[in-house]
Image (spheres, coloured by chain):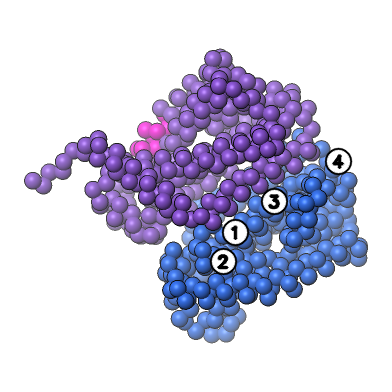
Chain colours: A blue, B purple
Amino acid sequence: MTPLSKIRAFIVRDFKSWWTYKLWVTLDVTGTVVFIATYYLVSTIVSSQKVAEAGYTLGGYFSFAMIGIAFQQYVFFAVQGISESIREEQWHGTMESILASATSFRLFLLGESAFRFIIASYFLLGSLATGLALGAQVYLNLGTVLSMVLLTALLVSSHVCVGIMSAGVIMKIKQGDPVVWAFSWMTQLVSGVFYPLGLLPWYLKWIGYAFPLTPALDGIRRCLQGGETLLSPAVLMDVVSLVLFTAVALPLALWVFKAGYNSSRTDGSLSQY
Amino acid sequence: MLREEPPKLRSELRQTWGVFWAQLKIFLSYKTWVVTETLSTVASIAMYYFMGFQVRPGQLVDAGYGSSWLAFALVGVASTHYLWMCISRLSHTMQHEIQDGTFETVISSPIRLRSYLVGQSIRGFLVSGYFMVGALVVGTFLLGAPLVLNPGTTLSSIALLLLLVSSHLGIGVIAAGVILVYKKGDPLTFLFAIFTEFFGGVLFPLQLLADYPVLWAIAKVMPYTYALEGLRKVLLTGQTLLHQEVLSTAALLGAYTILLIPLGLLIFRAGYNRVRTEGSTASY
């Protein structure tokens, strides 16, 4: 079997398992719609002044929140998904069987995360579509859409590193993964998901710059709410930040993963929960 | 000789304590989880604090909730999180037992299902209580949310919280029954969590839904809507159970309790009997 066909097999397996639980799929979709609708109503009591001051001029607070929620949920589902799939394999005692097969661990990780990113993308598009249906306004032209696609691709690549790191940690400590925690709650607090960074004190703002979601959200909002493209210096700076993060995080993530994996193999806890 | 002995109260209490103690030990063994969940609570309240800087207080004042959106959101977020953790405990445990293949062991042991369910629930109440008190302490004393805290409002809040949980206990039992049959992912509690946040008006004044008759009607059917309204009256405006409005909210929650618990037990029993008949208690 070629590596590509193995990844396809992982995707088909995960899709079949996901599709079995149709009620769960329906609830996932309902949850996304209701979450966006909640912030639609919140936006009616929120002033758009701070958002406009930050350079996101079109669409006001609702467009701002819609983009923040959609992309934060996107990377959270994807990152959490990788560590969750590792936990599930450990839980069911199937991890050792997979590792004993002719599938390398790198391929296994890629296969486990592929479907999570596909499904997260589906929910991302769903969130944006719901927001637009409820009246969110964004600049949609070739320049802004292409810039957004590139920023999203960089966001994904930076979070694949985070997912790999998280998988290494969860393999060792089993529950309460601090990496997933940092990329869910901490990003909501310091990455400007629900409010512009200008509202934060300087020390939280600096913590925010350590997370790739911060420049990604800024860049995407500049494109969709400010009409800027990759040619704008501010968006270009966001792109450079994301590339730098990925370049630093990838070797670190592989090292953390290897350490967690080797440690679990040494103490014989690969299948233990 | 083969006749089953009727259970003694003392042995039931011991069984309940055993289940609770075992679950608490498991909870405390996941130290990283406890630390990250505690920090999440602090982070989430801090997030609402910063979000509050953008809110125009006009509509909150018009709706009678005062001018602090942080205080408004704090009561909503803390109570909905508390409720969700309490209610999802049973279904979550049930899913784990089925997934691990230990559910058959539990029901075939001498432990009574009632002791098992009560022991699990007490653990749920204590753990979620810890997070709720943490959220209120951080919001009130660190971030300055102006809650009215005195003996009268504290006692009234505790009474309303107990009624809030009891009025939703039936939903938790229904969810546990649904898990027994469908195995996957406590759908009812998930649905409940997202719907309560939206229809209960956790982050915005409920009056905003009045323009949408269908949504308004759904909001008015949910017991959480009344409980949150009562809690806000107590903690934001200083009313107590001695006030007519708060007292009628308490009575309404009592009525929901009387209606939903037997319904929940009925549905759980049906699910329990179905999986035993099908022989699918251990299948996943």
Name the residue located 29 percent from the left edge and 43 percent from the top edge. B15
Amino acid type assigned to the residue bearing label 1 in the image: Pro
For mark 3, name the chain.
A
Asked whether disc 4 touches disc 3, contact meaning CB atoms under 8 Å apart, the reply is no
Name the residue located 89 percent from the left edge and 60 percent from the top edge. A234
Q: Which residue is mark 2?
A: A169
Asked whether disc 1 touches disc 2, contact meaning CB atoms under 8 Å apart, the reply is yes
Asked whether disc 2 touches disc 3, contact meaning CB atoms under 8 Å apart, the reply is no
- Numbered disc in front, either 2 or 4: 2
Asked whether disc 2 touches disc 4, contact meaning CB atoms under 8 Å apart, the reply is no
Give the alpha-carbon distance from disc 2 to disc 4, as whole Å.
41 Å
Q: Which residue is mark 3?
A: A188
Q: Main secondary structure of the magenta part?
A: helix
Within 10 Å of disc 4 (Cα), the crowding (few <14, some 14-19, many 20+) is few
Amino acid type assigned to the residue bearing label 3 in the image: Gln
Q: Which residue is mark 4?
A: A49
Name the residue located 61 percent from the left edge and 45 percent from the top edge. B41
State whether residue A75 is above or below residue B43: below
- Numbered disc in front, either 2 or 3: 2
Badge number at residue A178? 1
- Numbered disc in front, either 1 or 3: 1
Q: Is residue A56 visible?
A: yes
Q: Are marks 4 and 3 on the same chain?
A: yes
* Magenta run includes residue B176: no
Q: Position of residue B171 (x, y in %)?
A: 45, 38
For mark 2, name the chain.
A
Q: Are marks 1 and 3 on the same chain?
A: yes
Within 10 Å of disc 1 (Cα), the crowding (few <14, some 14-19, many 20+) is some
Magenta residues, start to end? B259-269
Amino acid type assigned to the residue bearing label 2 in the image: Val
